Image (cartoon, grey):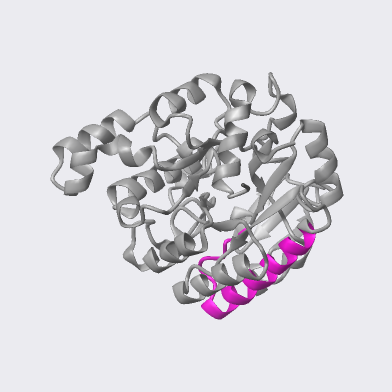
Amino acid sequence: MSDAHRVIDVHAHAVLAMAEGAAGAAGPELGTSPDGVPFYRVGGYRLNGVRYEGSPFMDVDVRIAAMDEAGIDVQVLSPNPITYFGSLPAADAVAFARAHNDALVELAAKHPGRLLTTAQLPVQDLDASVAEARRAVRELGMAGVYIDTDPAGRTLDDPALDPLYEALVDLDVPLFVHPSPLGADGPADDPRLRRFDLDLTFGFAYDETLAVAALVFGGVLERHPGLDVCVSHGGGAAAFVSGRFARAVAKRPWASAALKENGFEHYYRRIWFDTHVHDELSLELLVAHAGTERLVYGTNFAGWDSGAAEEPGGPGGGLGVTLAANAARLLRLG
């Protein structure tokens, strides 16, 4: 089967046993509360009710069996967004990223041809991030890198990130952007998002929409025309507000000359998005504004919101062939 026809899932996180305690007091820590509820703790954030042990997140053989059941041929494994560790001391973050990337590649090697990997970076140290990106791609064979929507407190258009973007263009690998539920004081700085899992639902969409704004309004895609960036969950609410974003570009004084000349949609359609949006009408809106050229299939595999095994029409539905061909291009599979 050609790469263009294989089902490729670009949104699949892994939780590695080696990570437990690797960040000192910040954890991570797997445990069970006295009432029998499993938890995963990172710093002051505690994710309750998620049992990673024995699941596809931690057991690669269970993952492969579940992929087979869901009709997924290839997955791109990525770091758990809860363990970005953007606030660790730089030396600790470098050591964690190197160990994590080594372990993720070792895990994927158990099933050749089924699993690709993306690198964690110590984003609080940009020189070290560039060095680790180069090591991850050139020495470990990783397929791309993975960062937060606001890596170490920076917006994605911060010029400090330009050397990393230049390195990724030179390495010819994509950048995957996915938010973390962690705020400075635990889950989500806005206390209203600490209710009803809103940090994971609306909070993620909020951060992803801001990421799109930073990439387009902040000139990242002007400065780095060869950079391929893939934003999770369809780019949040960006498709819904794209008309308002376009009007702002036309009317507000902060838009660059190139942005005013080319328009919002020109740069918006240069971003890649996964289709993990849960709703056919939402997907239709995404297609209407972003097009289909840069959409790729994603599931958050085995997560609370994954529906990979239940999709009508098989993985990707009517867009399945297009999404597969797009993912092969994004991942440089040839």
Q: Is residue 161 above or below residue 213?
A: below
Front residue (pair 116, 189): 116
90 part of magenta stretch: yes
Work out which quarter of the rendered image holds the N terminus and state it.
Answer: top right
Residue 203 seen from this side: yes
Residue drawn at x 39%, y 37% as measured from the top left: 269
Snapshot quadrant of residue 291: top left
Question: Percent from the top left, x then y, of residue 69?
Answer: 82, 32
- Magenta residues span 83-107
Question: Percent from the top left, x then y, of residue 232?
Answer: 52, 42
Q: Is residue 309 above or below residue 35?
A: above
Q: Main secondary structure of the magenta part?
A: helix
295 part of magenta stretch: no
Q: Is residue 280 above or below residue 25?
A: above
Front residue (pair 171, 195): 171
Q: Is residue 75 left or right of residue 211?
A: right
Front residue (pair 320, 146): 320
Q: Is residue 293 left or right of residue 94?
A: left
Q: Is residue 119 above or below residue 261?
A: below
Question: Percent from the top left, x then y, of residue 246?
Answer: 25, 34
Residue drawn at x 80%, y 47% as measured from the top left: 35
Question: Percent from the top left, x then y, of residue 205?
Answer: 47, 39
Residue 255 seen from this side: no
Q: Is residue 159 left or right of residue 185?
A: left
Q: Is residue 108 left or right of residue 315?
A: right
Snapshot quadrant of residue 122: bottom right
Residue drawn at x 58%, y 50% as measured from the top left: 332
Q: How many marks?
A: 0
Residue drawn at x 62%, y 56% as measured from the top left: 143
